């Protein structure tokens, strides 16, 4: 079978190669992949930043969709012909995360989905909303579940709340869609007026160009009559967390999602203490969370935003697009 694998760290050593078709265990299923999607974590993995000790070669990517073409003799959850998506952490089925559960993630440390055929335990997949295309459904396992977990499961966002979203990448755009689904007000930032216009078309109520307005935290305060937002989804890390503290209301929440500008912000504990803030780290979510999200997506007929779709042979181009940050929403690869 054809796969893309990392043989050394760096895009130049992301290589299309051949591997034997996986052999199934009694509790495994064989999936013929039809589409996968990229996350910033995947780019960090390829570049050797996410886990420099990762054993190579490695098939990257955690997210993918395909058709079940064979099942082990003990499999009960799925049948041949089902369309399924991988879950991010194969052993995190429900409840709280744990080290053993988070050690089962695809695309590092375990081989991922960027292959023609993938063998997974039957517990490591979910069924999908029927109205989604393969390239749309492939965006759900990481970015979709992360956004849902941040603002719905943990954040308990409700109608009339205000949420601040940073940037227009996959997690932020999913969070925008979920926030509007529950009737919340959305403020979103970007350095691109064109992307902000697209965000408004999706329902964003207020937009801020942080490149033109470096004091964007003050604008957020102005837009909320000085009170601050109920919830911030912080994807920036070093360059944004301090401003996130200034944007959130008393007793509000900041969901820490990403480290796009670095992992080590200077942490001022005073506003966290004095404003009774809740800081919640979010690392994707369980299979149960994924299934909850899928029910909502199916009911509302929500469509994930896929900005660009590449062929399997142009996988390196897809990673380069992720690296230059020109995309809006998600990037998918269709087989």
Image (cartoon, rainbow, N blue to C red):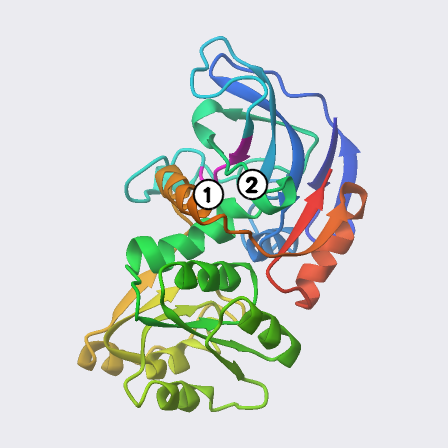
Is residue 88 inside the magenta stretch? yes
In front of the other: 218 or 104: 218
Residue 214 is covered by the magenta coloring: no
Residue 112 sits above or below residue 156 on the image: above
Crowdedness near tag 1: few (<14), some (14–19) or many (≥20) residues, C-alpha within 10 Å:
some
Quarter of the rendering occupied by the C terminus: top right
Image coordinates of residue 156 in percent, x first then y, are 28, 59
How would you rate the neighbour count of disc 2 (Cα within 10 Å): few for under 14, some for 14-19, many for 20 or more? few
The tag earlier along the polypeptide, 1 or 2, is 2
Above or below, comparing residue 62 to residue 203 in the picture: above
Residue 7 in the image: state x and y as whole percent.
71, 42
Residue at the disc numbered 1 = 298
Total numbered badges shown on the rendered structure: 2
Report if the CB atoms under discs 1 and 2 are less than 8 Å apart. Answer: yes
Q: Where is residue 218 in the image (x, y as percent from the top left)?
A: 40, 91
What is the CA distance from the residue labelled 1 to the residue labelled 2?
Answer: 7 Å
Which residue is found at the position 67% from the left and 60% from the top? 322
Res 36 quadrant in image: top right
Residue 57 seen in render: no
In this view, the residue in front, 109 or 242, is 242
Residue linked to disc 2? 131
| Region rendered in magenta | 84-89
Q: What residue is rendered at 31% in x and 53% in y?
A: 153
Q: In this view, does 246 lie above or below 259?
A: below
Which of the pair 99/321 is nearer the observer? 321
Which residue is drawn at the image coordinates 44% and 49% (left, top)? Answer: 300
Q: Residue most toward the top?
A: 73
């Amino acid at each position: 079978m054809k796969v893309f694998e990392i043989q050394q760290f760096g895009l130049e050593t992301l290589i299309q190669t051949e591997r034997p078709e996986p052999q199934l265990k009694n509790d495994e299923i064989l999936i013929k992949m039809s589409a996968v999607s990229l996350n910033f974590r995947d780019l960090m993995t390829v570049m050797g930043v996410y886990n420099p000790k990762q054993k190579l070669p490695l098939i990257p990517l955690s997210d993918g969709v395909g058709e079940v073409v064979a099942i082990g003799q003990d499999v009960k959850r799925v049948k041949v012909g089902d369309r399924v998506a991988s879950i991010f952490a194969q052993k995190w089925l429900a409840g709280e995360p744990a080290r053993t559960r988070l050690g089962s993630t695809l695309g590092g440390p375990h081989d991922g989905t960027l292959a023609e055929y993938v063998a997974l335990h039957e517990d490591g997949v979910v069924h999908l909303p029927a109205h989604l295309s393969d390239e749309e459904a492939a965006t759900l396992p990481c970015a979709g579940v992360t956004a849902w977990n941040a603002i719905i499961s943990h954040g308990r966002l409700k109608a009339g709340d205000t949420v601040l979203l940073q940037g227009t990448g996959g997690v932020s755009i999913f969070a925008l869609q979920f926030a509007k689904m529950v009737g919340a007000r959305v403020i979103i930032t970007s350095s691109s007026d064109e992307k902000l216009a697209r965000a408004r078309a999706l329902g964003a109520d207020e937009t801020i160009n942080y490149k033109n307005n470096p004091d964007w935290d003050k604008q957020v305060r102005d837009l909320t009559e000085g009170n601050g937002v109920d919830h911030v989804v912080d994807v920036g890390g070093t360059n944004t967390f301090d401003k996130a503290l200034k944007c959130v209301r008393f007793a509000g929440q900041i969901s820490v999602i990403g480290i796009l500008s670095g992992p080590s912000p200077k942490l001022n504990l005073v506003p966290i203490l004095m404003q009774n803030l809740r800081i919640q780290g979010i690392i994707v979510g369980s299979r149960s969370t994924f299934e909850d999200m899928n029910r909502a997506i199916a009911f509302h007929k929500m469509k994930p935003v896929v900005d660009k779709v590449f062929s399997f042979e142009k996988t390196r181009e897809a990673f380069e697009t992720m690296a230059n940050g020109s995309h809006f929403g998600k990037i998918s690869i269709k087989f």
